[in-house]
């Protein structure tokens, strides 16, 4: 199985200079337009969900091959660049930091403007993917970047990134709607990463029975479950590699009461429950293991990730003249394609040898 989905990257300070970002926007829009013409907009989502393609695309745009900033800057360039081709009907919502919090609002505005019927569905999916990677997959990386990419036909992809503040490394998560069988069971397109660590993985394939037990447990009396949790905090086996010392029993009971009022019926709804953060899910999972005997997974679903120059001069400085010529050449190809010369574009692609069979 081809592994795609997660990449570990070192954190770099600073941001792309304006002269580079402006070029990145233009080049990104032209490349994506060509892909859309030849393969359709769903191919763009498929490519973005592949971290190897994403990394190579970032290098093509002139960003650092090994920088965590490639995620935020490339997605920013794509978001702005696609505005030049509204006819493609492919949209990007969200971004880094505070911009990520505006994702639901942006999705709603775009859907209203273009008459797309999936607004509420997309907003729920945006929230769910963020909560899964932040809370259900407890790998030590807190999300700080979230982008939701979608089309008018209902296809979507998510590219989001988390940070480990202790080691100053970032991890990127990729989702693709067409490849998901169940949102709460190994939903990522697949996964790549340099570093493995002890991870409470509530979305592992082996965790389905645990998820069912957690949902059932969430409907039990809060006092009874809190009592089990108090005992668990005193007897937690060393093999779990995680601690319950920071669990607030009072807050746990409050979320349990909310779960009963909401009548949780599945794990997706449990994840989306207000107040059900990483600590609550961890406590509920450990308690479910004690009561129901369901096993917890501590598998980190990660392995490895990985070109114009880079903004820091690696592997060489960006050549602005060559970069601008590339943009103009692609624009010319697109203009010809628009008037029916798609076959010429395909011939040029074969001639230049850029066609790949592994993507």
Image (cartoon, rainbow, N blue to C red):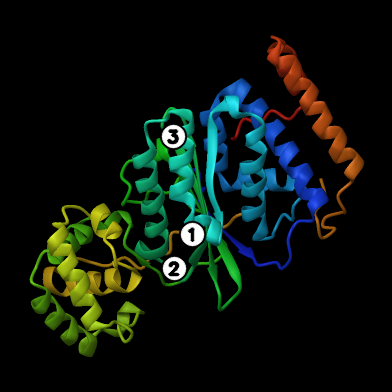
Q: Are marks 1 and 2 in contact (CB under 8 Å)?
A: yes
Q: Please say if 144 is above or below 164.
A: above
**Secondary structure under the numbered disc 3 in the rendered image:** helix
N-term-proximal mark, 1 vs 2: 2
Mark 2 surroundings: few (<14), some (14-19) or many (≥20) residues within 10 A: many
Tell me where residue 232 sits by quadrant.
bottom left
Disc 2 designates what residue? 139
Q: Is residue 266 left or right of residue 238?
A: left
Callout 3: few (<14), some (14-19), or many (20+) C-alpha neighbours within 10 Å?
A: few
Q: Position of residue 352 (x, y in %)?
A: 79, 26
Counting other residues with Cα less than 10 Å from the Cα at mark 1, is it few (<14), some (14-19), or many (20 or more)? many
Mark 3 and mark 2: Cα distance apart in space: 36 Å
Identify the residue shown where x is 73% and y is 30%.
354
User: Is 73 drawn above or below residue 115 in the view shown?
Assistant: below
Examine the rendered structure and indicate whether residue 77 appears above or below residue 346: below
Q: Residue at x 73, y 18 (%)?
A: 345
x and y percentages locating residue 290 in the rendered image: 16, 75
At 63% from the left and 28% from the top, the residue drawn is 35
Looking at the image, residue 28 sits to the left or right of residue 301; the answer is: right
138 sits to left or right of 191: left
Q: Secondary structure at mark 2?
A: loop
Residue position for label 3: 112
Q: CA distance from mark 3 to mark 1?
A: 38 Å
The quadrant in which the C terminus is found is top right
Which sits earlier in the primary sequence, circle 3 or circle 2?
3
Marks 3/2 in contact by CB < 8 Å: the verdict is no
90 to 56, vertically: above or below: above
Most distant residue in the top direction: 340
Q: Which residue is mark 1?
A: 302
What kind of element bears circle 1?
loop
């Amino acid at each position: 199985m081809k592994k795609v989905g997660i990449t570990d990257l070192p954190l770099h300070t600073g941001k792309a200079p304006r002269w580079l970002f402006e070029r990145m926007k233009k080049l990104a829009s032209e490349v994506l337009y060509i892909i859309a013409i030849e393969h359709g907009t769903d191919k763009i989502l498929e490519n973005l969900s592949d971290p190897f393609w994403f990394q190579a695309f970032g290098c093509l745009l002139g960003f650092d091959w090994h920088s965590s900033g490639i995620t935020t800057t490339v997605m920013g360039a794509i978001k702005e660049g696609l505005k030049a081709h509204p006819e493609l009907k492919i949209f990007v919502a969200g971004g880094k930091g505070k911009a990520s919090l505006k994702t639901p609002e942006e999705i709603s505005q775009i859907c209203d403007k273009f008459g797309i019927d999936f607004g509420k569905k997309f907003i729920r999916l945006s929230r769910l993917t963020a909560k899964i990677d932040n809370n259900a997959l407890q790998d030590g990386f807190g999300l700080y970047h979230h982008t939701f990419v979608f089309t008018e036909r209902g296809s979507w992809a998510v590219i989001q990134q988390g940070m480990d503040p202790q080691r100053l490394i970032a991890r990127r998560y990729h989702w693709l709607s067409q490849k998901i069988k169940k949102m709460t069971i190994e939903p990522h397109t697949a996964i790549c990463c340099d570093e493995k660590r002890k991870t409470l993985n509530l979305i592992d394939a082996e965790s389905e029975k645990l998820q069912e037990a957690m949902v059932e447990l969430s409907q039990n009396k809060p006092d009874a479950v809190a009592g089990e949790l108090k005992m668990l905090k005193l007897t937690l086996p060393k093999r779990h590699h995680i601690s319950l010392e920071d669990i607030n029993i009072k807050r746990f009971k409050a979320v349990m009461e909310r779960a009963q009022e909401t009548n949780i019926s599945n794990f997706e709804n449990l994840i989306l429950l207000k107040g059900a953060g990483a600590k609550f899910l961890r406590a509920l999972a450990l308690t479910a293991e004690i009561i129901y005997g369901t096993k917890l997974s501590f598998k980190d679903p990660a392995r490895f990730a990985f070109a114009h120059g880079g903004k820091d001069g690696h592997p060489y400085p960006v050549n602005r003249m060559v970069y601008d010529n590339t943009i103009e050449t692609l624009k010319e190809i697109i203009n010809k394609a628009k008037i029916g010369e798609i076959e010429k574009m395909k011939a040029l692609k074969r001639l230049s040898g850029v066609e790949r069979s592994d993507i």
